[in-house]
Amino acid sequence: AQKITQTQPGMFVQEKEAVTLDCTYDTSDPSYGLFWYKQPSSGEMIFLIYQGSYDQQNATEGRYSLNFQKARKSANLVISASQLGDSAMYFCAMRGNDYKLSFGAGTTVTVRA
Amino acid sequence: SAVISQKPSRDICQRGTSLTIQCQVDSQVTMMFWYRQQPGQSLTLIATANQGSEATYESGFVIDKFPISRPNLTFSTLTVSNMSPEDSSIYLCSATGLLSGANVLTFGAGSRLTVL
């Protein structure tokens, strides 16, 4: 069984600063994928970034980077240069061999001007 | 990546009634899933929609309550049957597709159901 843990229910960050969202996972699958999604108040789920379990490099997508530490089973999301539009709920998710996604509880990010 | 259209986007329903949510993908996809997001909660997988055969349900979800169809590779429906206020949730259709070189699950905008 897969398990995703996000321990930060809410985070506040000042505009233009960086914020790190924590995510740890547990799985017995040798191959898996890790994802981060953003959910603004409108409710849509927006894909941000992906990290494969065999990828040697940490994934980056614009202002988003994923700090992947396989031995520690962590996949933290770093948002750099925060903007007001980054205020949203952020979900960490994991996919195993069956292509199903399991989601963490989510972290609410509020960016302050 | 696949673009997913979902309707209705929201609805207010009476207790005891049923509602069917439609999901249309703009390209043929292999995997389609239905998720539920209860208020203030994370996403929970309801079932995998299998093309031309019965859906595969997760623990806690049954076909009588959430019948699912997938007649072809681009279309699926989810029915929420005999609704109660506890069914008030956002229901999200999702499909796998290539994005940024990875096989990513993309989502429709969701159907926000309120049951009175």
Image (cartoon, rainbow, N blue to C red):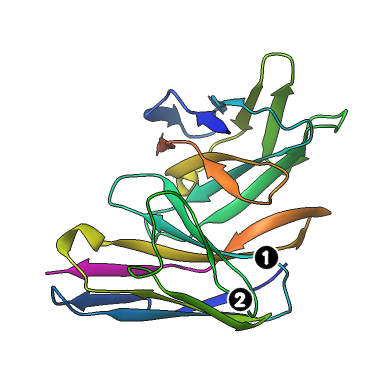
Residue A82 in picture, x, y percent from top left: 54, 37
Q: In this view, does A36 lie to the left or right of A41?
A: right
Residue A45 in picture, x, y percent from top left: 51, 56
The residue range painted magenta reads B108-116
The chain that hosts pointer 1 is: B
User: Looking at numbered disc 2 in the image, what kind of residue is underneath it?
Assistant: Ser
B115 drawn magenta: yes
Residue placed furthest toward the right: A56
Q: Determine crowd level at label 2: few under 14, some 14-19, many 20+ residues with C-alpha closer than 10 A.
A: few
Dividing the image into 4 quarters, which one contains the N terminus of chain B?
bottom right
At 14% from the left edge and 77% from the top edge, which residue is drawn? B14
Q: Determine crowd level at label 1: few under 14, some 14-19, many 20+ residues with C-alpha closer than 10 A.
A: some
Task: Point out the tag, 1 or 2, that comes first from the N-terminus.
Answer: 1
The chain that hosts pointer 2 is: B
Residue A101 in picture, x, y percent from top left: 59, 47
Q: In this view, does B26 lie to the left or right of B109?
A: right
At 43% from the left edge and 43% from the top edge, which residue is drawn? A89
SS class of the residue under badge 2?
loop
A75 drawn magenta: no
Q: Name the residue under label 1.
A: B31
Residue sitting nearer the eye, A96 or B25: A96
Give above or below for A7 relative to B78.
above
How far is disc 1 from disc 2 in space, using C-alphas?
A: 13 Å
Residue A81 in sight: yes
Q: Name the residue under label 2.
A: B53
User: Looking at numbered disc 1 in the image, what kind of residue is underneath it?
Assistant: Met
